Amino acid sequence: MKYWKQIADSFLSLIAGFFVGGIIIWLAGFDPILFYQGLLIGAFGNLYYLMTTLSYAAPLMLTGLSFAIAARASLFNVGAEGQSYLGALAAVSIGAFLAMPNLAHQLLIIIVAFILGGLLGGLAGWLKVSRGVNEVVSTIMLNYLSLYLSNYLFTYQFYDPMRAYKTKDIEATAVLPFVMPGTDLSFSLFLALLVSFLVYVLLWKTPFGYEIRAVGLNPTAASYGGINVRRSMIMSMFISGGVAALAGAFEVMGRFHCMDTELTYIKGYGFDGIAVALIGRNHPIAIIPASILFAMLKTGVQAVQRYTSVGGRTGVPLELGLAVQGVIIVFVALPSIIDMIRRRMR
Amino acid sequence: MMDLGILSIFTEPSFYLGALRLMVPITLAAIGEIITERSGVVNIGLEGIIMLGALSSVYVGYFTGNLYLALSAGILAGIAVGILHAVISIYLAGDQVVVGVGLNLFAYGIGVITLYLTWGTFANSPIIPKGAQIPKLYGFSPFVPFTIAVGIAAWYIIERTSVGLRLKAVGENPRAADSAGINVFRVRFLATVTGSVLASLGGVFLGLDWLASYTRDISAGRGFIALAMVVFSRWNPIIAVLSGFLFGFLFAVSLSIPSGIVPDQVIWSIPYVATVIVAAGFVAKARAPAALGKPYKRE
C-alpha cells in the first residue's frame, strides 16, 4: 500500500516534469509532441535503439544506487561524478598497463575501482562526521579534484601516442564482452543488475543495512539504540563511492575500452544518477526501471538531435534533456503538490 | 636584482586587483546564503542561480546594449528563482536540498540551450556591446566596493536591527517566533528571495563585468564554494567578505601561475582543494541555525 503511493508519486512527478519540459521545448522553438514521439522511437524503435538504451541504463543504475545508499543514511552524496572518474582511472591504468589472465584482470579492476571510489566517498563521510563539513560541499569540491587528477594522468601518463586525445586501449583480458555484437550493450548491464540486487540485500537483509537505515531515519534514536552512527555514515559513503566508481570502470571495460583525456565519455552520469535515485525513491529495485527511463531520455534526445539536423546545422541540443531532468527533480521535491493533484483527481 | 621567478606575480598590483574582482561572485552569493540560512532555509541552488543571473543579463545586454536593462534582467532572474525556491520549500514544505539540486541541473541545461539557440554555439556567447558592460571607476569595478558594502549592511541588519532579530528568531525557533506574532513564512520568503537576488548579482558580475559574455561553465563551482564559505564564516557576513578575499586570492593564484612550471591540473584544483581544507579546519567550531533545512508547518 505504502509502495503504491510512492510509485504513484514518482509517476506524477514524471508527468509534471515532462509537461513543463514540453513547455520549455516549445519555447525553444521545437514541437513538443514530435519531440516526445522522436524520443520514444529513438529509444525503443528497433532492436539496436533498445540495446543502446539498455547500455546507458547500466551506468545510470550504478550512480543511482550510489546516491540511494548514502541517502538511506540521510547523506547527500553529490560526488558520484568524481567517484566514477576514479573508476575509469582504475580501469584504464590496470586494464591497459598490466598483463593478466582473463577474469582475474576484470576482477582486479572492479576491486581497485571500488576501493578508490570508496575512499573518495569515505573521505567526504569522514569530513562530515568528524569535522562537520557538509557533504554536498565536500563531494562537489572532490569532484573537481578527481576530474583534474584523472585529466592529468590521462594526458601525461596513460595517453595513446597515436591519438593523444585518448588513452591507450585496455587489454582484451580486461574487456567486458558485448552481449550483442554491433551494439553498445555489454555485460556491464548484468553486473549492474547484480549490484542492484546486492545493494537490496545489504540494505534490507543485513544488520549493517538496518543500521544505515536507522541512522537515516533518526540518528539520535539510532545512537541511543547502540548504533555507531559515525561508522554507519562513513561506511555508507564508502559503499556509495565504490558503487559510483563501478559506473566509470564498466563504461571503460564495456563500451569504450579507453577514455578521452577530458573524460567527456562519462561526464554527467553522476548527476543523472541523482534523478534516477529520486524517481526510484532510493530503493535499489525501483532504481532499475528508473535508470531505463532516464537512459531512454538520453538515447531519445540523441536520436531527436539526428532527426532534426539539417545540413551542417545540428538539431535539438542534448542539454534539453538535462533541463527536463532538472524540472522532474524539482517536482520530486514537491510531496504536497503531488498530494494536492491527487486530491483533485479523486 | 633578485630573480623572484614564479613569486614575482605577488609583487604586481594587478594581481591583487584581480583577487579583489574574483572575490565578488562568491562573496555576494555567500552573503545572500547567510541571510537565507539565518531564516532556516538552505539553498543548494546557488550555482544555478549564478548561471541564470549571468545568462539573463548577458542575453538582454547583448540585444539591447543597455546596461540598466541588462542589470534589471539579472535581478529579475534572481527574484523569479528566489520566489520559485521559496514557494516550494516554505509554503509547500518541499525538500530544500532536492529543489536546489534540480535548480542547478535545470539552469545548466537552460544555459546551454540558450547559447545554442541564440548564438549557434555550445561554448560561449560573443562579447556583449560596450554599452552593456559595467563601466570601470578609476580602472576599478564598482562591484568590489558594492560587495563590501553589502557585507557590512547585511551584518548590521542581522545583528543590530529588529528585522535581524526576527530573522534569527525564525531560523532558531520558528514555533516560538510564530507564537510571538512573527509571520514565519513571510520572513523566510523574503530572506530566500533576498539571498537569491544577491547570488544572481554574483552571476551578473561574471556576465557583465568579468567575462562580458556567457560561457557554459560560467559558475565553475562558485555556488558550492559560497556554500562552504557560509559555514566557515560562521554565518557572519563580515567574515564572509574576508574569506571571500581569501578565495579571490586563491582563484587569482590559480589564474596567474604561468603554465609549464607545475601541471595546469594542479593549479586549476587549488581553489577546490583549499575549500575542503579550510572547511575541515574551521567548521567544527561553527553552529548552524537550529531550524536550518526543516520546513515549518503550523499546527
Image (tube, helix red, strand yellow):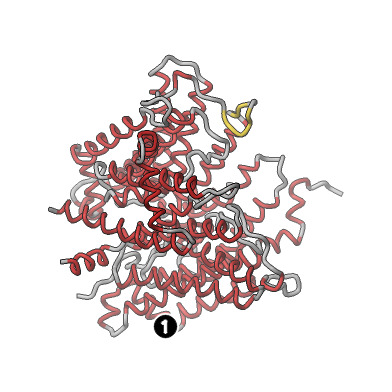
Q: Quadrant of residue A12?
A: bottom left
The answer to which of A320 and A335 lies nearer the viewer is: A320
Q: Position of residue A163 (x, y in %)?
A: 63, 29
Check the image and name the residue furthest to the right: B1
* Chain at tag 1: B
The answer to which of B76 and A235 lies nearer the viewer is: B76
Q: Amino acid at mark 1?
A: Val
Check the image and name the residue furthest to the top: A101
Quarter of the rendering occupied by the C terminus of chain B: bottom left
The answer to which of B55 and B278 lies nearer the viewer is: B55
Q: Position of residue A334 (x, y in %)?
A: 29, 63
* Classed neighbour count for the residue bearing mark 1: other residues with Cα under 10 Å, few (<14), some (14–19), many (≥20): few
Determine which residue is flagged by label 1.
Answer: B163
Q: Is residue A223 visible?
A: yes
Left or right of B155? Residue B147 is right
Q: Residue at x 45, y 72 (%)?
A: B80
In the image, residue B119 sits, relative to residue A215, either above or below, namely below
The answer to which of A147 and B23 lies nearer the viewer is: A147
Q: How many marks?
A: 1
Q: Residue at x 56, y 67 (%)?
A: B202
Q: Residue at x 76, y 62 (%)?
A: B13
Q: Quadrant of residue B101?
A: bottom left
Left or right of A275? Residue A286 is left
Q: Position of residue B287 (x, y in %)?
A: 39, 63
Q: Is residue B20 visible?
A: no
Q: Quadrant of residue A295?
A: top left
Q: Position of residue A81 (x, y in %)?
A: 45, 44
Check the image and name the residue furthest to the left: A1
Element class at badge 1? helix
